[in-house]
Amino acid sequence: MEYIEDKDHLPDLRVRIGALELRNPVLTASGTFGYAREFANLVNLHRLGGVIVKGISLLPRHGNPPPRIIETACGMLNAIGLENVGVDRFITEKMPFLEGISSPIIVNILGDSIEEYRQLSEKLDVVPGISAIEVNISCPNVKKGGVAFGSDPQMAAAVTKAVKENTSLPVIVKLSPNVSDITEIARAVEQAGADSVSLINTLIGMAVNLRTKRPHLANVIGGLSGPAIKPIALRMVYQVAGAVSIPIIGIGGIESTEDALEFMLAGATAVQIGTANFVNPRASEEVVEGLHDYVIRENLYSVRDMIGALERS
């Protein structure tokens, strides 16, 4: 069922990410929502601000061996290894369903070289139903000996430029928190033409099994997400908001309407719901409902009034 807002009777939840208008600021985070079909019987996909599918690479990836996920205090460690069907199968097998969703579809892309990012952007640019591209720059760069693109401002800018040159779609660059100064990376991708930045990606962590005296994850290390990283994510969003002029999408431990509003106060235009989807599959839709009620209750003209409205002492 298509969800249609009556703009004469509902509060204004619309926000803009570059040229892309979202009916509300709530997106699903890549890697936590599959290809959306998995949640179709649990969430009204048409009510969401947008759906970001799991990361897509040029060729299929099988990911890391199990165990790949472990629950931690206030969070989760994952070492899935970017498993996905590859761009060609994504276009032929997944996009027909995604095209039927009235919410914007944003495709997260990943690569091991700038050339792979370039080819992915070119392929996706002509696919009907895709509204934007989110660029994961936390992947290793093979030609640089495994250094992640997201930890080097010049490399981050080079990837951004390559994507922008090969697509007419809005480009969102997803930033890694595993850097000494995230504002430096944010400024670099903004100067390279990014329409928006999303942050933060997962923090690097590990968990130990005391009984077996071995790491819990077969990959040893993984990405930490969930409420445990929220204070770090909020801090980084706040810092980046003071460093760039492009829209920011906040990610990290967002489970409730209150969490989403805190990120917006810190400077985020929109937010992504990630790990919360594993705990409560309706989390994203519930946040949309909560924002609707909040704007009415606080007698706001628009949810946009909350963006960057944090009082700085």
Image (cartoon, helix red, strand yellow):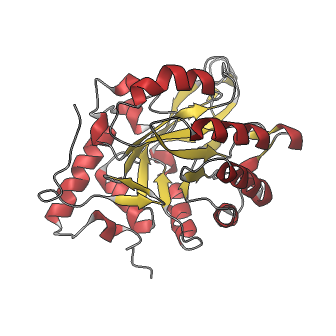
Judge whether 12 appears above or below 174 on screen. below
Where does the image place residue 88, in percent across and percent down from the top left? 61, 24
Residue found at x 47% / y 36%:
128
Q: Position of residue 281 (x, y in %)?
A: 33, 31
Residue in front for this viewpoint, 251 or 35: 35
In x, y percent, where is residue 164?
65, 53
Q: Which quadrant of the view contains residue 305?
A: bottom left
Q: Quadrant of residue 297?
A: bottom left
Q: Is residue 208 left or right of residue 93?
A: right
Whether residue 13 sits left or right of residue 108 in the image: it is: left
Q: Which residue is more in the foreground, 80 or 126?
A: 126
What residue is shown at x 73% (from left), y 58% (from top)? 157
- Spot occupied by residue 13 in the image (x, y as percentages of width and height): 27, 58
| Above or below, comparing residue 83 to residue 168 in the picture | above
Residue 4 appears left or right of 121: left
- Between 146 and 51, the one lying in front of the other is 51
Residue 205 appears anywhere in the view: no
* Residue lying at 26% horizontally and 43% vertically, measured from the top left: 286
